[in-house]
Image (tube, helix red, strand yellow):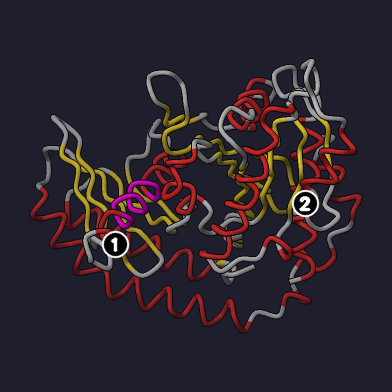
């Protein structure tokens, strides 16, 4: 849910990175964190297990600059990807302004992608949202790995509404900012429309 | 979008700050701040220093969401207050509608006093927020600066 503060001239929006376990959601945030100037970001909070699997969420505030005299701040969240953390995923979607679905391009993860995308639609609905009406980007991650499904084929399977599709290698930063830009643009455009 | 955006006017912001300032003084707390249930910090007052209030806001919301989830599992609607007591610093969180009142305090105060004072301002904050929500629903977005946002404005954010 967008928060507009006229007193401090700020807009705050919430973006959630969703996807199956180990697809690279935290890696996206980590890359953004590592490549952003210190004054534009807050801390990267990671509520992870001892083996670095996301337990509840990762969070990072990011200031992009000013638009029409308002500071735009995006709160980036990831959800835990593992299937049994569904209750947590639902909670994190509350108040979301835009979603990035990070798909794992490897052939053996196709079922996990489909299951997670279905789970996203279900959980959005339980919070009163429809994926069709929400700013949304599909990221095809891990494009550098040997067993990847061709991008077109993967997109055909996962595409929901003609959303922007970004090919990425989050570990090296390929496509990470393009993804963020694509979703941020839709969120801000939504502000104009609403 | 499912929720109405929160649109806070300068006057309302200062009213909230004034309530937080009074609460902080009356409860001898270190910091008092208001956060929405989605983790956005609305206003803060007190000895902030190097306290990372943005992260604290997000974690407080996560905390309330998680305990709210537990409440539902045992047949409760929600847990309206949460307290965490540390060796030196403690936190008290009070759920007020879609807002969370978060008070950070140390041994200059006590949990009992903070709870009492937080409860006393709850109604006032609740009324203020009802007014803000009414205004947001009436808001004519065509008069807002965002109605004029262009693709160039958005692109320029990523080149700054």
Q: Where's residue A137, x and y in %?
A: 76, 47
- Residue sitting at 76 percent across and 56 percent down? A188
* Residue A132 within the magenta-colored segment of the rendering: no
* Secondary structure of residue under mark 2: strand
Q: Position of residue A11 (x, y in %)?
A: 64, 55
Q: Secondary structure at mark 1?
A: helix
Residue A38 or A158: which is nearer the viewer?
A158
Q: Residues within 10 Å of mark 1 (few under 14, many from 20)?
A: few
Q: Nearer the viewer, mark 2 or mark 1?
A: 1
The answer for how far apart the CA atoms under marks 2 and 1 are is: 41 Å
Q: Residue at x 22, y 52 (%)?
A: B82
Q: Residue at x 84, y 47 (%)?
A: A164
In front of the other: B14 or B44: B44
- Front-most of residues A78 and B102: A78
Density class for disc 2 (Cα within 10 Å; few <14, some 14-19, many ≥20) is many
Could you say which is closer to the camera, residue A177 or residue B113?
Answer: A177
B106 to A7, vertically: above or below: above
Report x, y in % for residue B39.
46, 51
Does residue B9 show up? Answer: no
* Image coordinates for residue B28, horizontal then vertical, percent: 17, 49
Q: Hey, which quadrant is residue A41 in on the image?
A: top right
Q: Mark on residue A67? A: 2
Q: Is residue B65 magenta?
A: yes
Part of the protein shown in magenta: B61-69
Q: Is residue B149 visible?
A: yes
The answer to whether residue A171 is above or below residue A81 is above
Q: Is residue A141 left or right of residue B64?
A: right
The residue that appears at 75% across and 22% down in the rendered structure is A173
Q: Are marks 2 and 1 on the same chain?
A: no
- On residue A148, the disc is none
User: What numbered label is drawn on residue B72?
Assistant: 1
Magenta part mainly helix, strand or loop? helix
């Amino acid at each position: 849910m967008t928060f507009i503060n006229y007193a401090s001239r700020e807009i705050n929006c919430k973006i959630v990175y969703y996807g199956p376990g180990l697809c690279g959601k935290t890696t996206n945030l980590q890359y953004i964190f590592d490549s952003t100037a210190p004054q534009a970001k807050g801390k990267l909070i990671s509520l992870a297990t001892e083996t670095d699997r996301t337990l509840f969420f990762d969070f990072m505030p990011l200031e992009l600059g000013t638009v029409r005299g308002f500071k735009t701040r995006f709160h980036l969240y990831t959800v835990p990807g593992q299937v049994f953390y569904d209750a947590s995923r639902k909670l994190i979607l509350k108040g979301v302004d835009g979603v990035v679905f990070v798909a794992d391009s490897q052939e053996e993860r196709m079922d996990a992608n489909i299951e997670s995308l279905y789970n996203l639609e279900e959980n959005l609905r339980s919070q009163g949202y429809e994926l069709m009406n929400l700013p949304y980007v599909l990221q095809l991650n891990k494009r550098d790995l040997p067993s990847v499904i061709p991008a077109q084929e993967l997109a055909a399977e996962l595409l929901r509404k003609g959303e922007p599709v970004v090919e990425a290698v989050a570990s090296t930063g390929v496509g990470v900012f393009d993804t963020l830009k694509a979703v941020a643009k839709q969120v801000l455009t939504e502000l104009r429309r609403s | 979008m499912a929720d109405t955006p929160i649109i806070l006017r300068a006057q309302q912001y200062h009213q909230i700050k004034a309530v937080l300032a009074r609460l902080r003084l009356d409860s001898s707390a270190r910091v008092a701040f208001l956060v929405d249930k989605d983790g956005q910090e609305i206003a803060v007052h007190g000895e902030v220093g190097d306290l990372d209030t943005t992260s604290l806001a997000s974690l407080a919301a996560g905390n309330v969401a998680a305990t709210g989830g537990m409440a539902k599992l045992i047949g409760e609607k929600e847990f309206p207050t949460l307290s965490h007591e540390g060796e030196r610093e403690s936190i008290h969180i009070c759920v007020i509608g879609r807002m969370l009142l978060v008070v950070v305090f140390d041994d200059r105060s006590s949990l009992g006093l903070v709870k009492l004072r937080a409860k006393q301002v709850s109604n006032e904050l609740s009324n203020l927020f009802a007014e803000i929500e009414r205004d947001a629903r009436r808001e004519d977005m065509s008069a807002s600066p965002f109605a004029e946002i262009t693709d160039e404005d958005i692109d320029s954010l990523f080149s700054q």
